[in-house]
Image (cartoon, rainbow, N blue to C red):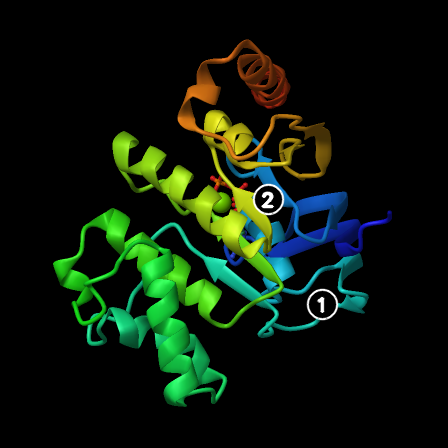
């Protein structure tokens, strides 16, 4: 049985024009990637290697310089309702309740009404916020706000969920809880997901595949299939097979960091 390819990146290069110097900075160069429908893929790599840049291009927020980015057979040219992004900071609207925030994306797409309110209520329950539908963002903890953020991203029923270090601002305990919750929610929705993190354990725990980017300009250095059964629980993190995956990925990133450090010393 063949699985449909959801997202394909072919030799993607992305540049920025630096305001200070007027010179180009090549952020990513030659990213090749195929992600199947329903796959959960983590991206890791050294700081500044172009992970956020790549995700923003998939979201349609920035244009690529060359190559191709294809979602469901169509080239990505602009943001669209088939994608939703979850950022590191929850970025909720403080003057809207939890329900109001979850409804926001739907309203932007002119999809208000009774049906949307039902969708919002269902998602608020799904992310574990039953009883908080009428609360204000300022009344919620960081973890709860990030749950609202996730519900808001899911509300428009996107084809592709893009997550850029969504748990980075949370404490260690809340972070693990959110990892479990995300797996539960992902199990219930089976959205194709692209998840950026600096946390190797988190990357392995969540994903079907972990992609390691090289140092800037970023491209795919390593693509590891995480062959661990689902559903997963936190004890998995202590198993030898899990630790072996972590080690492989850690060494791959370490190699990139060392390579750039020695380059900097020569310069
Ligand atoms: N708006 C911009 N203008 C110019 N350069 C940029 C811009 N945004 C990012 N860059 C540069 O592009 C490179 C890649 O940045 P990016 O934010 O994609 O990295 P990252 O892998 O997400 O890093 P981190 O892990 O620290 O979040 C960096 O060298 C950064 O300085
Ligand atoms: Mg980033």
Residue, far top: 240
The residue tagged 2 is 50
Rendered location of residue 160, percent (x, y): 61, 59
| Residue 15 shown left or right of residue 174 in the figure | right
Question: CB under 8 Å between callouts 2 and 1?
Answer: no
Give percent across and percent down for residue 192. 62, 53
Q: Is residue 90 visible?
A: no
Disc 2 under 8 Å from ligand 1? The reply is: yes
Read off the residue under disc 1.
76
Residue at (25, 53) in percent of width and height: 144
Q: Is disc 1 placed on a helix, strand or loop?
A: loop
Q: Nearer the viewer, residue 122 or 63?
A: 122
Quick one: 81 or 51, which is closer to the camera?
A: 81
The foreground one among 84 and 66 is 84
Discs 2/1, front? 1
Residue 126 can be seen in this image? yes
Mark 2 residue crowding within 10 angstroms, few (<14) / some (14–19) / many (20+): many
Which residue shows up at 58% across the image and 39% down it?
Answer: 42
Q: Is mark 1 within 8 Å of ligand 1?
A: no
SS class, disc 2: loop
């Amino acid at each position: 049985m063949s699985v449909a390819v959801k997202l394909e990146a072919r030799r993607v290069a992305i540049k920025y024009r630096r305001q200070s110097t007027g010179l180009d900075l090549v952020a990513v160069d030659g990213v090749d990637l195929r992600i199947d429908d329903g796959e959960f893929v983590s991206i890791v790599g050294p700081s500044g290697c172009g992970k956020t840049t790549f995700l923003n291009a998939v979201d349609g927020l920035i244009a690529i310089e060359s190559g191709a980015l294809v979602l469901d057979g169509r080239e990505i040219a602009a943001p669209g309702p088939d994608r939703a992004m979850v950022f590191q900071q929850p970025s909720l609207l403080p003057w809207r309740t939890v329900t109001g925030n979850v409804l926001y994306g739907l309203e932007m797409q002119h999809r208000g009404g009774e049906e949307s309110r039902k969708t919002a209520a269902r998602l608020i329950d799904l992310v574990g916020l039953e009883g908080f539908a009428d609360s204000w963002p300022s009344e919620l903890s960081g973890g709860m706000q990030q749950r609202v953020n996730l519900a808001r991203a899911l509300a428009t029923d996107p084809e592709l969920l893009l997550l850029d270090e969504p748990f980075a601002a949370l404490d260690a305990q809340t972070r693990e809880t959110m990892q479990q919750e995300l797996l539960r929610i992902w199990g219930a929705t089976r959205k194709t997901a692209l998840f950026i993190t600096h946390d190797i354990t988190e990357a392995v725990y969540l994903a079907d595949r972990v992609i390691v980017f090289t140092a800037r300009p970023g491209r795919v250095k390593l693509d590891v299939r995480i062959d661990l059964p689902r559903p997963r629980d936190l004890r998995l993190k202590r198993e030898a097979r899990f630790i072996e995956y972590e080690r492989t990925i850690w060494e791959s990133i370490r190699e990139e960091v060392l390579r750039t450090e020695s380059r900097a010393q020569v310069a």
